[in-house]
Amino acid sequence: MIAVVDREYRFLIANHQFAKTRNMTREQVVGRFAHEVLNREFFENVVKPKLDECFQGKVVTYETKSSYPGIGERDLFVSYFPIEADNGIDRAACIMHDITDRKRSEESLRESEQRFRLAAQTGKMYSFDWDVTTDVVVRSPERVKVLGAKEPLRFSHQQFVGTIYPDDRPAFIASIAGLTPERPAAEVIFRVRSSDGALVWLKSSGHGFFSADKLMRVIGMVADITDLKRAEESLADMTRKLIRAQEQERARIGRDLHDDINQRLAMLSVELEQLTENPAEWQDRVQEFRNRMAEISNDVQALSHDLHSSKLEYLGVIAGIRSWCKEFSQRRKMEIDFSSDISSAVPAEVGLSLLRVVQEASNNAMKHSGVRQIEVQLREEAHEIRLVVTDAGRGFDLEESTQGKGLGLTSMRERVRLMNGTIAIHSKPTAGTTIDVRVPLVTTPTPQRAAG
């Protein structure tokens, strides 16, 4: 959800998602004071103090809860960014991310930790005794609950090391090598294959016994922490996605507001100031100013449309992408030759990823290709969607661009990867650019590493 407010806490901009979540139209939000749109108590106690900090020149971030009509209470991560004009900071851009799902994942993680404690009580752990002099390891019968019924009761320590996942062996071996009479205890986390082939996360806590500084025996406990590790990885993945989405949206909104909208408004302000010195010209230029204000308003609305994929919801994936291409062509005076022969229903999450790739590729072509025509093709091939975006422009050095600071190519790759798809980018200086994306029609979550 995105909005811009002025120093009087009046909404100047509100995107579709902001209005929709509050069960309002943008016309019902823009121009009204924040305390009229939000709950007054929530505005006075939470929003206003944070906005006041922002108007002092600070970037403010915080988490809060807010209730929405028909939705109920949601957890939000809120960011406020000051926007400077010639007379100082007079506006604040507000970005609100719904992190309710992330919060639920954190709760799931806490529940997993509780399950780990219960697992210890119900036997999802086993003890071991390693006689270093004979290299024989004896494990308690509870091992079958963790590693499967085929696991032997006793075997050599070297055999056990061979069952450890290769990436984890160095840490396991180092934990044993680090045992000394002064520091006889060690703890290490690693993965092994159970007798049924599944990859299991284990946490081993051991205590060494020495004779004349020589390690003679190690005893300890091993616990199955697979559920806990999966929950941690799930939470970390969701957090990475949230951070990535935040950074990309911040960068784009900042560029569009500062480099385009803000500059045009500043120029308009300068010309109006000059006009006060020549009142005779006022009548002749009123229509010109009206037209320019209408253009700025249309571009702000287009920015909101680009950030929110409402057309995909109302028109469907193919028609929504076609409509965006048509709007972009009219707005940017760039011809997009769009074609599609897809007959299957395209999942919404796949459609959104494809739209973002088309948007990024189209904007890149407009800014860098040097041509005013691109081709967008959507095809259905063997249970997958293929998107090809082509321009015959000046092209670029792919390796050099990848190493730069831009997020465009990285963003496209990440979106496609999250859909279990592939993306190939072909470009050379003076030879044009082709972006070739293939995404399965039915997507499945990327498997967690702990599951093999």
Image: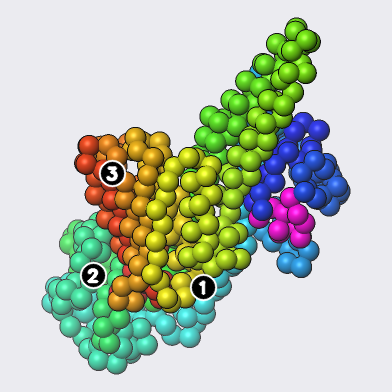
The magenta span reads 17-26
Q: Residue at x 28, y 44 (%)?
A: 392
In the picture as drawn, the residue positioned furthest to the top comes out as 277
Residue of label 1: 112
Near-viewer residue (398 or 323): 323
Question: In front of the other: label 3 or label 1?
Answer: 3
Q: Could you say which quadrant of the image residue 182 lies in? A: bottom left
Task: Please state which of the two labelled residues, at mark 2 or mark 3, is closer to the viewer.
Answer: 3
Q: Residue at x 26, y 86 (%)?
A: 195
Residue 187 belongs to magenta span? no
Q: Can see residue 446?
A: no
Image spot of residue 162 (x, y percent): 16, 73
Say which label, 2 or 3, has the lower sequence index: 2
Q: Label 3 is placed on what type of residue?
A: Ala
Q: CA distance from mark 2 to mark 1?
A: 23 Å
Instruction: Check disc 2 and report its element: helix, strand or loop.
Output: loop
**Residue that label 3 marks:** 392
Quarter assignment of residue 250: top right
Q: Is residue 166 above or below residue 246?
A: below
Residue displayed at 76% across by 68% down = 70
Q: Residues within 10 Å of mark 2 (few under 14, many from 20)?
A: some
Q: Position of residue 123 (x, y in %)?
A: 43, 85
The spot of residue 407 in percent (x, y) is: 40, 43
Left or right: 120, with 311 as reference point:
left
> Tag 3, which secondary structure?
loop
- Could you say which is closer to the camera, residue 43 or residue 280? 280
Residue located beneath label 2 in the image? 165
